[in-house]
Image (cartoon, rainbow, N blue to C red):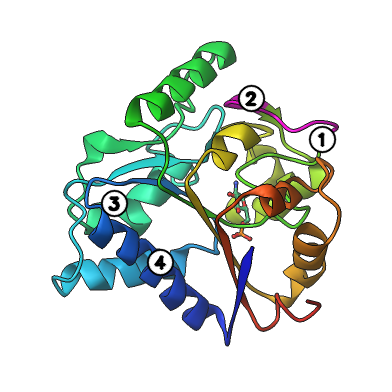
């Protein structure tokens, strides 16, 4: 595991954008695994700048997102599809037909998950997976559990995640309680993994996940077993390492 310490959020975002840009330049038809949350917005902003300056071409890129809230439509401004459209896809020349997010409006969880596993499979696997880190060590929406999940599944969000996500909704009642998420095995199958993490509040979980024991109670800890992981942490997030 390669850990890069960045000065601040902006530098973390620029370094992450370097990684993703390099992937696209080396393999223009690559498959990017993408994430939502406040961690990657700066990275996406950097990628948009590089596209606008003519340095980056997304026309052959395919993307698969980690997760989606169950029950939210793509038009809902809190859905992860909406997030990806507004924070990245609408501003670069990616073919939207090749951008995949689990179908939050599919009420049949078994179907939504099987369909998404098929999408990942049909893409030929993920070249580079971008991840944020939840306060409790979750990746995607893989919450602390007794075992690592394999493929895409429907997860009951923990009270701490529901609380953390409440800041984006007008009331607690509106925060979805379930989500469809790629499983740990799907994430671990990515050829390369890039984790971005910033802020003092994440310092404890960064230490636990990346230097502690590998356990499904801290889902991100499994990344220690992957052969090609880079963590970019800003000074505050890396302060306990
Ligand atoms: C959500 C997302 C995760 C993300 C996490 C951390 O739960 N499902 O993919 O990594 O939030 O979010 P943030 O980057 O805002 O701290």
Asked if residue 170 lies left or right of residue 11, the reply is right
Q: Are circles 2 and 1 on residues that touch, CB within 8 Å?
A: no
Please report whichever mark, 2 or 1, sits nearer to the chain's N-terminal start.
1
Closest to the observer, 95 or 169? 95
Q: Is residue 83 magenta?
A: no
Task: Give the mark, 1 or 3, whose residue is nearer the N terminus.
Answer: 3
Whether the residue carrying mark 3 lies under 8 Å from ligand 1 is answered with no
Left or right of residue 74, residue 223 in this image = right
- Residue located at (22% from left, 57% from top): 92
Find the magenta span and give its range. Answer: 146-154
Asked whether the viewer can see residue 35, the reply is: no
Q: Please say whether residue 150 is one of the residues in the magenta stretch.
A: yes
Q: Which residue is mark 3?
A: 89
Query: Real-space Cα distance between discs 2 and 3?
Result: 25 Å
Instruction: Give the secondary structure at mark 4.
Output: helix
Among the two numbered marks 4 and 1 on one chain, the one whose residue lies closer to the N terminus: 4
**Residue at disc 1, CB closer than 8 Å to ligand 1:** no
Q: Is residue 143 left or right of residue 21?
A: right
| Separation of residues labelled 2 and 1 (CA atoms) | 13 Å
Which residue bears the numbered disc 2?
154
Q: Left or right: where does residue 69 sit relative to residue 208?
A: left
Q: Which residue is mark 1?
A: 145
Give the total number of marks visible in the rendering.
4
How much space separates mark 4 and mark 2, taking CA atoms?
30 Å
Q: Quadrant of the C terminus?
A: bottom right
């Amino acid at each position: 595991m390669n850990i890069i310490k960045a000065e601040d959020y902006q530098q973390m975002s620029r370094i992450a954008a370097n990684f993703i840009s390099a992937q696209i330049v080396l393999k223009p038809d690559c498959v990017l695994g993408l994430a939502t949350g406040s961690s990657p917005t700066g990275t996406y902003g950097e990628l948009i700048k590089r596209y606008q300056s003519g340095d980056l071409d997304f026309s052959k890129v395919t993307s698969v997102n980690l997760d989606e809230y169950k029950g939210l439509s793509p038009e809902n401004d809190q859905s992860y599809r909406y997030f990806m459209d507004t924070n990245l896809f609408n501003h670069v020349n990616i073919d939207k037909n090749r951008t995949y997010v689990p179908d939050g409006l599919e009420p049949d969880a078994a179907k939504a998950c099987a369909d998404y596993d098929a999408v990942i499979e049909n893409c030929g696997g993920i070249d580079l997976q971008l991840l944020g880190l939840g306060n409790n060590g979750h990746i995607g929406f893989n919450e602390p559990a007794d075992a690592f999940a394999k493929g895409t599944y429907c997860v009951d969000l923990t009270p701490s995640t529901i609380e953390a996500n409440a800041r984006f909704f007008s009331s607690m009642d509106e925060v979805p309680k379930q989500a469809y998420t790629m499983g740990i095995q799907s994430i671990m199958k990515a050829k390369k993994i890039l984790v971005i993490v910033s802020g003092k509040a994440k310092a404890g979980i960064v230490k636990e996940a990346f230097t502690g024991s590998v356990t499904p109670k801290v889902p991100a800890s499994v990344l220690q077993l992957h052969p090609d992981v880079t963590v970019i942490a800003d000074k505050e997030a890396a302060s306990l390492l």
